[in-house]
Amino acid sequence: MPGVNDPCLACFLLFEGGKMKKRNKEVVVYCASSSEIDPIYFEAAAQLGKMLAENSITCINGAGKQGLMGALNDAVLKYGGKVKGVIPKFMIDAGWGHDSLTETIVTETIHQRKAAMAHAADAVIALPGGVGTLEELAEIITWKQLGLYNNPIVLLNINDYYQPLLSFFEKMIDEKFMRADYSGLWSVASTPGMAINLIEKIPCWNPSFTKYKKKEL
């Protein structure tokens, strides 16, 4: 059994009154800010927000008030959960920020925003989104490949939205651009409930098993 200094266990445990206690997880959710998308995606975002709140999981995202991000944030707050929003100042100035979040962190740049979100995340869930969501997802998978982030990454594949991307990942592996072992960097869920279940059960990624692991000749 791992000790309290084990890096995986330390992600989720605190001491309170001399006893070991699980703390509430903080989960980053990447998702679209577009409002012109199929209602099925809004339903999934709202359901995920409700389930995060009911499971006492703090939702971390880009602090937006529109699209899936707005629906997610509204649902978490409606059901008594907590939302930590991280947003660059230029987006605040443009009026993109949600006004009622539990906590809002303002950064100077988009790069600082992404780093702050990843640093706080006990897990990542990617709802469907556009190129910004894709960029965030690709970056966190790359960080995990490099051993810079070791927690669960779950693609919430509503309406088979991520199927083309998953096929592309398979092509990367088939064409030897990526090791087959790295297919374990991410997991796929078809429902919000499955996504919550996966982040509870997926073990930490072995930090020694990275891109810089000694290659076989």
Image: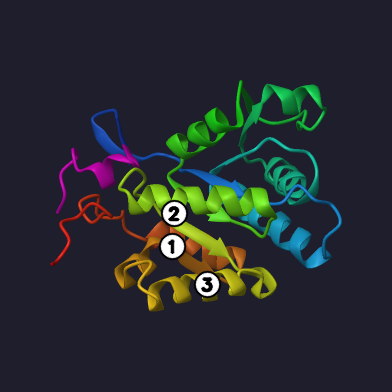
Label 3 packing within 10 angstroms: few (<14), some (14-19), many (20+): few
Q: Give the residues drawn in magenta, as a range.
A: 1-13
The three-letter amino acid code for the residue at tag 3 is: Phe
Using the image as rendered, state which of residue 200 and residue 141 is in the foreground: 141
Identify whether 79 is placed above or below 37: above
Q: Which residue position is annotated with label 3?
A: 168
Q: Earlier in the sequence, mark 3 or mark 1?
A: 3
Neighbours of disc 2 within 10 Å: few (<14), some (14-19), many (20+): many
Residue drawn at (24%, 42%), measured in percent from left and top? 7
| Relative vertical location of residue 125 with respect to residue 19 in this rendering, above or below | below
Q: CA distance from mark 3 to mark 1?
A: 14 Å
Residue 20 is a magenta residue: no
Number of callouts: 3
Q: Residue furthest right?
A: 36
- Front label number (3 vs 2): 3
* Residue at left offset 66%, top offset 40%: 80
The residue singled out by tag 2 in the image is 141
x, y (%) of residue 208?
A: 20, 51
Rendering coords of residue 155 (x, y %): 54, 62
Residue 125 location, x and y as percent?
54, 54
The answer to which of marks 3 and 2 sits earlier in the sequence is 2
Q: Nearer the viewer, mark 2 or mark 1?
A: 2
* Circles 2, 1 touching at the beta carbon (< 8 Å): yes
Q: Earlier in the sequence, mark 2 or mark 1?
A: 2
Q: Residue at x 76, y 32 (%)?
A: 98
Q: Amino acid at mark 2?
A: Ile
Which amino acid, mark 1?
A: Trp
Q: Quadrant of the C terminus?
A: bottom left
